[in-house]
Amino acid sequence: MTTSVKGRLGNLPLELTSFVGRRREIAEARRLLATSRLVTLAGIGGVGKTRLAVRVAADSRRSFTDGVWFVALGNLHDPALLPEAVAAALGLPDRPGSSESRLLVDHLSTRQTLLVLDNCEHLLGAVAEFAQEQLRACPELRILATSRELLGVHGERVLRVPPLTVPDAGQTPPLEALPQYEAVTLFVTRAAAALSDFALTEANCAAVVGICSRLDGLPLAIELAAVRLRMMSAEQILQRLTDQYQLLTVGSRAAPTRLQTLRSCVDWSFALCTAREQNLWAWLSVFVGGFELDAAEGVCPEELAADDLLDALASLVDKSILVREEGAGVVRFGMAETIRDYGVERLRESGDFSLAQRRHLGWCERLAAQAATEWIGPRQTDWIARLDREQSNLRDALAFSMTQPVIDTDPDVNARIVNALFLFWTCRGLLAEARHWMDRSLTCSESAHAADRLATLFDYGVLAGMQGQLGDATTRAQQCCSLAEQLGDTESLETANYARGYLAMFRGDLAAAYEPFQAALASAGAAFAAGPGPGRTGLRIARQLGALLGLALASGLLGDEETAVGCYEQTLAITTPRGESYFRAYSSWALGLTALRTGDIDRATTLMEQAMRLNRQVNDPLMTGWCLESMAWIAIREDEPTRAAVLMGAAETLSQRVGTASVPLPYMLGNHDECVQQARDALGKRSYTEAFRTGAAMSLEESVAYALGDLPADQPQTTPVAPVLTPRETEVAHLVAAGHPNKVIASMLVLSPRTVTGHVEHILAKLGFTSRTQIVAWAAENQPD
């Protein structure tokens, strides 16, 4: 039967449900269509390529006087029938003796037409050949294709279709801010269609955000989850999403088979991969948070990590299994969680999952060890950036290293990793996380090598002292010293002296820190004089530099400027030839405190600014906070109370982020209290609070720019830039400050305890706080004068 095309302007399918979001993608696709004749919308299955293509085509109708035509290829399995499928979609009459391709050329050669070729991934060769042939012969034709893989045609422009935008599940935004996230809007829209009385509320918003985040913002998965509201609450759906392939099986019976369930959707993508690509997909799923080429080479079996691994990765990118990201000169690959879960399942089925985990653990250990070895060197900032990118992989590897099968075969591995990561965790202000892993390592690996255990005890004690946890610091330092005495070797006894010196400083007994630091440094100096030998680089150099810093602080604050300067010069002698920044910054800060104590304000300012500029290269929030606090003390002495208040606010925010006090040693508390009092007296309570909150709202980069004079903001804004609480949140904050628990506040305000808990979490997030105690202080500062 033939169908005439006369008078028809297209056959786009009707949209049976509302279209959500995608404004940026629609605008970009239309821009590409305006300048290119072949545009491919590429993305993983279920990301919404078809809906986007239909919307773009509908919005583009006016540009195509001869119509916009939709060709569904998902159920076409014979590539030879592609021209017939296109001709049928166009409604062209049969012409005996003429090929369908020739018929299409004759029809389209003089017409302004847009063809939408949907789901091309399983017919790539045929579609690519067809597109080239038609575009060459038909100058007014344009093609919009959707595919999980690029067509690979000359002149093809590609728009990667990302998942819908999702909020951070770890910190649910306020209810009124959620509609800006496309995934949430889609879920709510489809949920209301499935359950007429569904609405987004304070009670369910956290669960909805969790669902959208867990499903990576994939429209198909979100729509399938929303349908489940007929039988479950949002909270129950979130709890059951640990096995999303089984949960999300209720789709539209009218949809193609491959789209009726999430499982079949991913099965479809898997079937389109070659055997090697399928195997590579499975092995790469062992990575968490992405990976780089060297990581894939280090983890995958030899047969997969062959010379053409890069080509195989590129093919998986083309098939939308991997997402390629480039930043700061580094290419990184990642998987959506849905795709990764599928790969893990395949890896388990193959029996290789445990082997892949062990190879992943081995790679993470080698990475951490190399970073520690080269930390005191010219690649320091490169290693910090790399470990930043690999945090998710490192955490996953550490968790695996503490499982019984690994402990039984290699009880030392988790201790080796946590010790290697000590400097990174400290530099990044991840003190609580570092202590968490160290505590687990000490608990689960009591049979670990004594030298590794000694290092973990020492590192833990230092971190606990930095966080003001003197009980924990004392316990670990004593355990470290006891173990060192049992071992009896020079390096162990040297570490014990470092531990004694730091513990004395954290207790506020600077004089008692002198002797152990000097003894340790004398031992280290003798060892280094003996030659570079094994074990005399990396972490051991770092410990020596740490001891020089501790001795410089103790001596400088006690008035022994000569010793402080000597420590500073030794630090420079070690670090400068190696191109190191981290310890040089700390050393400049310590010497600046010495200059400040002697009243040499100009020299103190120069040294503090030098420390800030060095630290800018590594962005250590702990060091930045200490420098900001110290520069506030300089500002108040130079009669700049507003600047002092802003700097103290910025320092307080960073110290809260790290979990330490803005004043690192008890000996310095007097400087802090004096600075606060003088700034308050000079500005008045309200102006001081506004200036403090201006600083508290600054990012790390902004606070450094302000401190160095690169940010012209000497006068704070009259309206505090810290997030403003809603009237209800302000009411809850003052009730918290009055000492009422959440249940009592709920009763007083006639709210559910869950709603009050949500309000308290929002208050903490908006004000950048981590405890109710800080809300008490905030409420006191924000009472009317």
Image: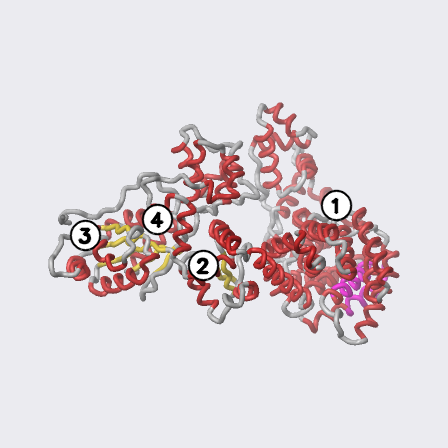
**How far apart are labels 1 and 3 at the CA level?**
78 Å
Residue type highlighted by circle 4: Leu
| Residue 757 picture location, percent across and down | 60, 33
Query: What residue did someone put label 3 on?
Result: 66
Q: Which residues are magenta?
A: 542-570
Disc on the earlier residue, 3 or 4: 4
Residue type highlighted by circle 3: Asp
Question: What colouring method underlies this structural image?
Answer: secondary structure
Q: Are marks 1 and 3 in contact (CB under 8 Å)?
A: no
Q: Are marks 2 and 3 in contact (CB under 8 Å)?
A: no
Residue displayed at 62% across by 61% down: 364
Disc on the earlier residue, 2 or 3: 3
Determine whether the residue tagged by mark 3 lies in a helix, strand or loop: loop
> Does the segment drawn in magenta span residue 552?
yes
Disc on the earlier residue, 2 or 4: 4
Query: What residue did someone put label 2 on?
Result: 278
Q: Are marks 1 and 4 in contact (CB under 8 Å)?
A: no
Q: In front here: 447 or 491?
A: 447
Q: In front here: 397 or 331?
A: 397
Query: What residue did someone put label 4 on?
Result: 52
Residue at the outermost left position = 96
Magenta segment, prevailing SS (helix, strand or loop)? helix
Residue type highlighted by circle 2: Gln
